Amino acid sequence: MYTEVTGMRVTRKLISTLIVVVTILHGCADKGAGLEFAADRNTIRKNGISLTSSLTADPKSGILILKAIIKNDSKQVVTAAAFRAQLRSDSGYINIPVNTKVKNFTVSPSENRSFTLEYKPVNNPQLFQRIRFKGDLSRKYTFNPAFITDMNGRVVFSKKIRFTLKKAKYSIYKKKYGKSPKLFSLRMDKKAFRKKHLKYYSRLPKKKRHDGNHTIPASMIISGEELMVRQMIFKMVPYLTGKRLFIFLKIINRSNGLSIHLNGLQVSAGGKVYKPVNGFSPGLSTDKKKSGKVKIKLQRNGRLYFHIDYGIVDTFRKLSVSLPGLLDENKKPLFILPLEYTSGS
């Protein structure tokens, strides 16, 4: 952040503006992000207030860096709620900055104010919904400067800034960093699966509500890829990246406890059995208790989003996942039948 006093002469004002533009664009290049987007307008102006911005990306991490400078040559104070600055992906998904320390600030008359916003954009909402992958970088992004208002609370700029990566550069990026995971979908006799498990649950100790006075009847709801069973929401989505198999695991636990043993989550496909080759991350929140590398206990209201790595696998179209390593608070398996999946959406 810096403040610059604008000179009285026109030549100084022009030189100052040019310095600002060069500084912000050069600053982005210094970031070493690798991909620089071209703007349809680097600077927009209205009523003596100008906004100069540029956008770059780190192709490996997918992080976007937006650098901007507000130059105020008006006679009123300008307010910028930068934490609400929206950057829209080509898919239409609206992203907000992840560096939440950048909040409201003001720019007084004859002052400049620079700021940097970092985004981790969701470029493919469908992929994000299924396996929490944000998707490859978009070729185009739209920056909305409506977070900048005058002293009366009116939005200063109505025009949006569109950033585009050249086709040749985008093609190179896609070849080197692009990821196109091949997803599997739940394909099985859901009615028979549900019937078998309801019979099994009826023999298990009855679950009680939080007040401890009423039991919860056995139930199972299968909605798309999600299973709601015994006070738990459960989802698995297998996917391939190249020849490597992963399973995205999502669990939201409302029960008194849920144990997960990774070695007990096995994949059968093409006549072979595959076991996880990775372990749980050491950075876990308080709603999870880790016991060794491959065992974890999820507390009440605990959530888990995890990508299980099964290593390099053979080619196949169908697979099944057996889950003896998923145990309730009484150490009873939650599932007695495997989940069956087929490649394709």
Image (tube, rainbow, N blue to C red):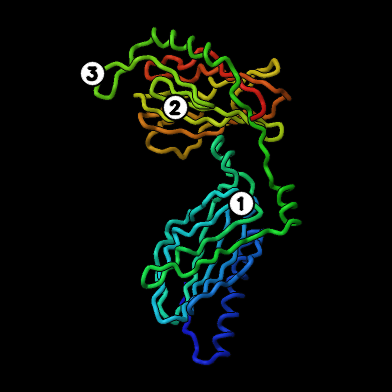
Per the image, label 3 sits on a secondary structure element best described as: loop
Q: Quadrant of the C terminus?
A: top right
Which circle marks residue 287 in the picture? Answer: none
> Which mark lies nearer to you, 1 or 2?
1
Q: In the figure, 19 relative to 162: above or below? A: below
Which residue bears the numbered disc 3?
Answer: 213
Which residue bears the numbered disc 1?
Answer: 90
Circle 3 Cα neighbour tier, 10 Å, few/some/many (<14 / 14–19 / ≥20): few
Q: Earlier in the sequence, mark 2 or mark 3?
A: 3
Per the image, label 1 sits on a secondary structure element best described as: loop
Q: In the figure, 230 relative to 174: above or below? A: above
Circle 2 Cα neighbour tier, 10 Å, few/some/many (<14 / 14–19 / ≥20): some
Which circle marks residue 233 in the picture? Answer: 2
How many labels sit on residues?
3
Q: Mark 1 and mark 2: span between their CA atoms?
A: 31 Å
| Left or right for 64, reference 216 | right
Circle 1 Cα neighbour tier, 10 Å, few/some/many (<14 / 14–19 / ≥20): some
| Left or right for 71, reference 245 | left
Q: Nearer the viewer, residue 179 or 80?
A: 80
Measured as percent of width and height from the top left, residue 264 is found at 53, 20
Q: What amino acid does circle 1 point to?
A: Asp
Q: Earlier in the sequence, mark 1 or mark 2?
A: 1
Residue depicted at x 43% and y 56%: 100
Q: Mark 1 and mark 3: span between their CA atoms?
A: 52 Å
Per the image, label 2 sits on a secondary structure element best described as: strand
Picture quarter containing residue 124? top right
Q: Mark 1–mark 2 contact, CB under 8 Å?
A: no
Q: What amino acid does circle 2 point to?
A: Ile
